[in-house]
Amino acid sequence: MDKSNELIKKVKDLEKQAKNLEKLAYDFIRRAPLKHYAALNEYDWDVLPSELTGIQNTLISSYRNWYYSVLNLIKQFFPNEIERFEKCYENKSDKGYEFGVLDILHLKSDVYNMNRSDVIKNFQGKFHVQVGLLSSIKVLDINDFKKDLIDAKISVFQKLDNLLLKFHEVALNLRNRVSRPSRKGFEINDEYDVQDLLHALLIIEFDDVRTEEYVPSYAGNNSRVDFFLKNETIFIETKKTREDLRDKKLVEELIIDIQFYQKHPDCKILYCFIYDPDDLIRNRAAIINELSKDLDDFKVKIMISPMR
């Protein structure tokens, strides 16, 4: 079975799961007890009996598994629709009038003071958006799409590689003010200076450059991502060599950093950018060979500037 047929089979299996989830959700909502407050003409959910609590837990768990399986496909085939797909999942805005499938399955009374038929309609509206995005994958010409996707990825890598390789040239030009030699230049003294200049360069080529993304805890610590190219799903970690950060210490730090990044659910491609203007690294080839990864679900590319 080729990759296209495998994908279509996966989509059909997820569509079948969606039908079962929808049927189970309708049955659950219809059976969930409602209280009616006659004086206020409002409804609220009563305490669920144990048999319905079990159904609810199974339903929520099954939906979550389905959601994350479909989300991975949306990220691959419809990256522009990620936000719309995610908004249908649950309310993360603290606004009472916004809700998602998970809110409905939890029967949140602060959102749903209404009769069960309206609840089912709301569930149907949100869930059908997600299922519709899943089903749209089947109408794609997968082979052409993959070719376009590969070409686009190559273009992204070329742009990023070119930018990183020219970083030192840009830094030298900023330090030595050609047009106004008397004016103070921009000196790169530490890693923060590297990040500031790299950020300025990245926003020329990429639309959504994020600097406040956190990776999950690893070994009891939290780590902040240096740069996350949201639309391209590429992460960038920066280092600047110094007397106490050469080959061995540099590799030790990057091994820990890579372990951090590998735990991030969105991190499939990681660039490690090492700025070595004083040529302190003795064996560049060893660092690149030791740290580079080319796995199906996680790739690490080591870039050292300037080139020697």
Image: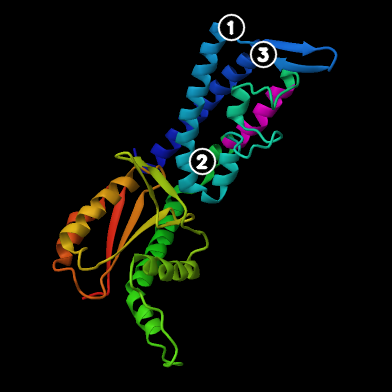
Position of residue 210 measured from the top left corner of the image (x, y, whole percent): 48, 57
- Mark-to-mark CA distance, 2 and 1: 41 Å
Q: Which amino acid does the dot numbered 3 rest on?
A: Arg
Crowd class of label 2 (few under 14; some 14 to 19; many from 20; radius 10 Å): some
Q: What residue is shown at x 14% (from left), y 66% (from top)?
A: 283
- Tell me where residue 232 sits by quadrant: bottom left
Mark toward the start of the polypeptide (3 vs 2): 3
Tell whether position 128 is magenta.
yes
Q: Which amino acid does the dot numbered 1 rest on?
A: Pro
Q: Which amino acid does the dot numbered 2 rest on?
A: Lys
Look at the numbered disc 1 and give the secondary structure of its residue: loop
Q: Residue furthest right?
A: 39
Mark toward the start of the polypeptide (2 vs 1): 1
Q: Which residue is mark 2?
A: 138
- For the question of whether residue 151 can be seen, the reply is yes
> Which quarter of the rendering shows the N terminus?
top left
Crowd class of label 1 (few under 14; some 14 to 19; many from 20; radius 10 Å): few
Determine which of the numbered discs, if any, sits on residue 49 in the image: 1
- Tell me where residue 5 sits by quadrant: top left
Q: How many marks overall? A: 3
- For the question of whether residue 297 can be seen, the reply is no
Position of residue 292 measured from the top left corner of the image (x, y, whole percent): 23, 55
Tell whether position 292 is magenta.
no
> Which quarter of the rendering shows the C terminus?
bottom left
Q: Which residue is mark 3?
A: 30
- The one of 110 and 160 positioned closer to us in this rendering: 110
Look at the numbered disc 3 and give the secondary structure of its residue: helix
Q: Name the front one of labels 3 and 2.
A: 3
- The one of 91 and 217 positioned closer to us in this rendering: 217
- The one of 139 and 29 positioned closer to us in this rendering: 29
For the record, the magenta segment spans 118-130
